[in-house]
Amino acid sequence: MSTTTLPIAKAITAGLRDAMHADEHVMLMGEDIGRLGGVFRVTDGLHAEFGSQRVVDTPLAEAGIVGTAVGLAMRGYRPVVEIQFDGFVFPAYNQITTQVAKMHYRTGGRVTLPMVIRIPHGGGIGAVEHHSESPEALFAHTAGLRIIAPATSQDAYWMTRQAIESEDPVIVLEPKRRYWVKGDVDPDHRPELGPWQAQVRRPGTDATLLAWGPSVPLALESAEAAAEDGIELEVIDARSLAPLDMETVTASVRRTGRLVIVHEAPVLGGLGGEIAARVSEQCFYHLEAPVLRIGGYATPYPPARMEHAYLPDLERVLDGVDRVLSH
Amino acid sequence: MTVFATTIPDDAHQEPMIQLLGPDGTRTPHAELDAVLTGGGGAEDLQSPDALRGYYRDMVMIRAADLEATSLQRQGQLGLWASALGQEAAQIGAGHAARVQDYLVPTYREHGVAWARGIEPWRLLELFRGISHGGWDPAELRTHPYMIVLGSQAPHAVGYAMGLQRDGAVGTGDRAHDTAVLALFGDGASSEGEVSESFTFAKSFDAPVVFYTQNNQWAISVPTSVQSSVPLAQRSRGWGIPSVRVDGNDVLAVMAAVRSALDAARAGEGPRFIEAVTYRMAAHTTSDDAGRYRPAAEEEEWAERDPILRLRRHLEQLGAIDEDFVRRCDDEAHELAMQLHHHIHGMEDPDPVHIFEHVYTEHHPVVEAEKQAYREYAAQFEDEADQDGARA
Ligand SMILES: Cc1ncc(C[n+]2csc(CCOP(=O)(O)OP(=O)(O)O)c2C)c(N)n1
């Protein structure tokens, strides 16, 4: 098998399957991931293929799911945990921040926790409350966790595999509203780019657009629209949120002199703020305009019929681009 | 003697299940619970022919509203609908067992309970349509907002009950004044840590709270056996909380157990736990495909135990129902469905500026600045639209 075309959800399925074949200690845990194949069908077929010892429909308790995964990891397994929706990771927040993130540190490096926490994240699916959250900053603020956010099928496949191979715990934020967007996957050739690196998705000269996960296609679409007006935007897919690959970002900003960061999470206290601070520290003399953030508001995620106004969209991104270019 | 047990049988699976109405409508007498149902007589009588006809009508109404909501979702009018089909007795019974002053704490599938509380069905639909996160004033209706995050409401119920204790609203002997809390959650949610912590608090403080789980056999695709290999009713006994398992498709058993438990709680006897055994007749929600994980035969088997049919048979045996009444209920139910349909089709989307409302009680500079910026930004498009309009 070489390159195939898969939706992002199926690329993750393939990544999980291949990881399970490659290492018998890889096991999956979560709510409804067995016979149902997960509410997004990401684990579809894996229960039938690997059985209930390796694909575990757990009781309905997120703290229990993540907490028992810690124990399994300490016993030599590589648990891959599915949290059903972003808003339901919080019962497990204690386990993730006080235990998962710190076990390696507090045991003086004696214990590793090679576990993965998969979270479908972000809005735009017309859902009821607590199904559209973007909690990346909460986790990125917690030392000891790695966080990645694949945006394409190829990344979905490979970053899933790389997350499982990592000796550190990794949170994978999956772009739920793009699960069924198709793209090429080459499962036979390991990409040169590591999972903790950003990637320039479109070269440009006038300003840099930085996005991740579900916002990457939006950034690309914005760049295309801007190009019609003769504006060349460089689009960077951050891919890794902890650690952040600042080298790729600052190299781009030094060329373009302008940066617009797009994310769905609230701008207030969001990761964009951390990136903006670092860019101003590292690229101060190259900046032609203040770094701008386009994202969610300092409010809870709104009811579905208003989410279009909350989420960054083409107009808001282009408005931001206009503003940085007006300097 | 009480049906509320504090011990577990040697063989845990020998846990009894209280049933007052058999699937064929036959009434089994039960000294303790019959006394609860009859109460002080008059308006207190929960099983007078009038009362029974009332439950029948309620169940028919709520089922019609439920089916209409499903079709509204199919028409794109709702983002999602979580049907309570099959759980009508478990909900109407529990809802009416509560006294007016009691505080009810629901999940997201409590449409029958809401109906019994006088909450109009269209208010529930606001949440499922996506125009609000919840449509009512909890204090006014003595009903907590619907809860999506499983189990999170359970400690709220206990805390509210602890407040009642401090207010002297428990154990005065005045049943019209003494108050209790009914905390509802599903079989799946019962596994959440917050539910266990709620048991702990409730018993430690002997708070006037009744925990009520509708074991509808499924948590999405996961059967109750994954949550517990023994009957759920036994869960609370390790905490010293007396509990009982009842047939949740039997409106009288539900009502008697819940009324009895709430009255004990309001009298200051501490918490109780009830497992109502029922069945989620529809898929988990309109997004779910139950065919992937459960056999149709199981659904058919449960259809035999339908709660509405059961009460109707009972009423027939009593000679307390006639064709005319049945037809009137059906007509009213149809009318309700039509109203719901028109109401939803007429619902306007909120102005997105509402995103910024009620984040805080007082002025907040960041929210205010973002709201202002949003207004100015949105106004550009209105101007453009006006200009387009003028040109056309
Ligand atoms: C904390 C949390 N985890 C996961 C979910 C997703 N979810 C919604 S309903 C559901 C199953 C609930 O089952 P149960 O408690 O038995 O209630 P039922 O839906 O059967 O009424 C799940 C897993 C959630 N809403 N909240």
Image (cartoon, rainbow, N blue to C red):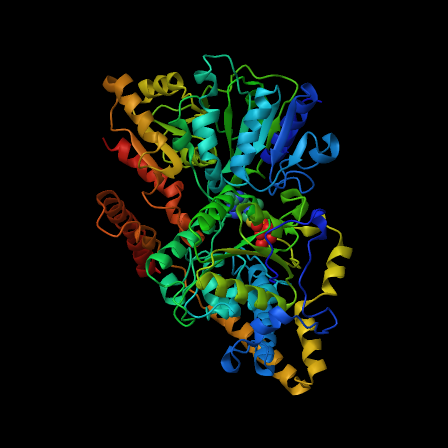
Which x, y percent locates residue B180? 44, 62
Q: In the picture, which quadrant includes the C terminus of chain A?
A: top left
Considering only vertical position in the picture, is A284 above or below B140? above
Q: In the picture, which quadrant includes the N terminus of chain A?
A: top right
Q: How many marks?
A: 0
Q: Quadrant of residue B216?
A: bottom right
Considering only vertical position in the picture, is B142 above or below B369? below
Q: Quadrant of residue A22?
A: top right
Which x, y percent locates residue B97? 52, 68
**Residue at the (60%, 43%) spot, across then down:** A39
Which x, y percent locates residue A204? 39, 24
Relative to the observer, which residue lies in front, B214 or B240? Answer: B240
Considering only vertical position in the picture, is B248 above or below A62? below
Considering only vertical position in the picture, is B172 above or below A166? below
Which x, y percent locates residue A138? 39, 32
From the viewer's perspective, tell me whether residue B25 is left or right of residue A320. right
From the viewer's perspective, tell me whether residue B142 is left or right of residue B186. left
**Residue at the (67%, 46%) spot, across then down:** B230
Relative to the observer, which residue lies in front, A188 or A107? Answer: A107
**Residue at the (49%, 67%) spot, across then down:** B98
The answer, for residue B212, to whether it is visible in the render is no
Relative to the observer, which residue lies in front, B311 or B222? Answer: B311
